[in-house]
Image: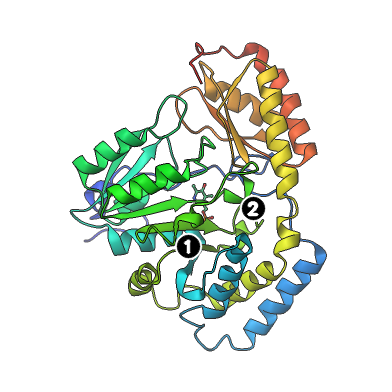
Amino acid sequence: MTGSTAAITLADLPLRPELVGQEPYGAPQLDVPVCLNVNENPYGPSETVRAEIGRAAAEAATTMNRYPDREATALRTALAGYLNRGGYELTANHVWAANGSNEVMVHLLQAFAGPDRVVMAFTPTYSMYPEYARDTHSRYVAVPRRADFTIDVDEAIAQVRLERPDVIIICSPNNPTGTTTGLEDIRRICEATEGIVVADEAYQEFVRDGVPSALDLLPTCPNLVVSRTMSKAFAFAGGRLGYLAAAPAIVDACRIVRLPYHLSAVTQAVARVALEHADELLARVDDLRRERDALVTWLGEQGLQTAQTDANFVLFGRFADRHALWSGLLERGVLIREVGPEGWLRVSAGTPEEMAAFRTALLEVLPDAARLADETR
Ligand SMILES: *Cc1c(COP(=O)(O)O)cnc(C)c1O
């Protein structure tokens, strides 16, 4: 290749054909007073936790000339301990950790999907799944959910028989709809496939009372993986720590494909501090669940449709021009997410002040917003 480095564009490069014209993910990072667009926890760590994170980072710095523990054993032990609060008997061998559950999912697809292999998910769902499939050269098969966003398990099983997926991803609570999938449904899908079934439980801590975790199924479903993250309920999105629980053999498969020393010494140290303060970091989860439920009620009172939600966000609509509504809110300093099926918008549960700002802004833009015809939800 000859010419000027300054003048070269993406179109001049020998990019993989499936990447041509693609845009990087995704959600706008705008400097706005009220950010309700990426389902973060609005409550930052306390001064005590901040000080301990600083101390742990300083301690990690004393051995920064050395590579970190490749196996992250102390961290994985602490993560198992956190999950075992739910009455499970998991050890470090059942747990894998990486830089966000995004990386956990890529490890799973690197190990179990790939060329000539199939990844199946139930749409509308998390927009990153097709990207993980693309980046691991896997074929992505999207099976539509019902109109109420639940999974039709008979249809799912028919599609499993037809497509023979190597990895099936069930996002529960589902992003962007908030819908959960029942344990019996997940079990039936696990039994219908020789592939790996991943329950992405990024929002599990926010479920309504009595909604169980797929962790209950781990002892009897050897092909099941339960994926979790510290990004949402744990208020640790900036720390980048995701993890999974599964049979030790599945963890071994992830260990084969991970890059050496993928979790930095600082990440391991500060995530352990966060886990030691789990009670404090998770304390606001109940407040956020209440804000979410109040938001569902309030949106209904405004004559809007909402999807049933067990996450820290609400999908609402339906608008003839959702972009106009999204822009109107942004002009008023409130950033939400234009995502999901046509006509819907997603808003994260925030602090009471943030929710009040959202309601005020929405009431200003709502009178001008044309609705789409009601669907049965
Ligand atoms: C936010 C989210 C994640 C978490 O991603 P991290 O990489 O852990 O920050 C995973 N799955 C879904 C569906 C999400 O919405």
* Label located before the other in sequence (2 or 1): 2
Q: Quadrant of residue 316?
A: top right
Whether label 2 lies within 8 Å of ligand 1 gets the answer no
Q: Secondary structure at mark 1?
A: strand
Which is nearer the eye, 321 or 192? 192
Q: Position of residue 261 (x, y in %)?
A: 45, 78
Q: Depth check: give the residue in front, 196 or 260.
A: 196
Q: Amino acid at mark 1?
A: Leu
Give the residue at x 30% y 64%. 111
User: Which of the pair 30/263 is nearer the observer?
Assistant: 263
Q: In percent of the image, x 53 and y 32: which residue is there?
A: 338
Q: Nearer the viewer, residue 290 or 61?
A: 290
Q: Can residue 8 be spotted in the picture?
A: no
Discs 2, 1 touching: Cβ within 8 Å? no
Q: Residue at x 60, y 57 (%)?
A: 237
Q: Position of residue 18 (x, y in %)?
A: 25, 47
110 sits left or right of 33 in the view: left
Would you identify the image quadrant in which residue 304 lies? top right
Q: How is the image coloured?
A: rainbow
- Tell me how far mark 2 sits from mark 1, CA to CA: 16 Å
Q: Which residue is mark 1?
A: 244
The residue lying at 44 percent from left, 60 percent from top is: 218
Q: Amino acid at mark 2?
A: Ala
Q: Name the residue carrying label 2.
A: 233
Dividing the picture into quarters, in which one does residue 345 lie? top right
Q: Residue 142 appears at what percent x and percent y? A: 32, 38
Quadrant assignment for the N terminus: bottom left
Provide residue 231's location: percent of width, then percent of height. 59, 56
The kind of secondary structure element at disc 2 is: loop
Task: State left or right for residue 221 relative to residue 46.
Answer: left
Q: Does mark 1 have its CB less than 8 Å from ligand 1?
A: no
Q: How many marks?
A: 2
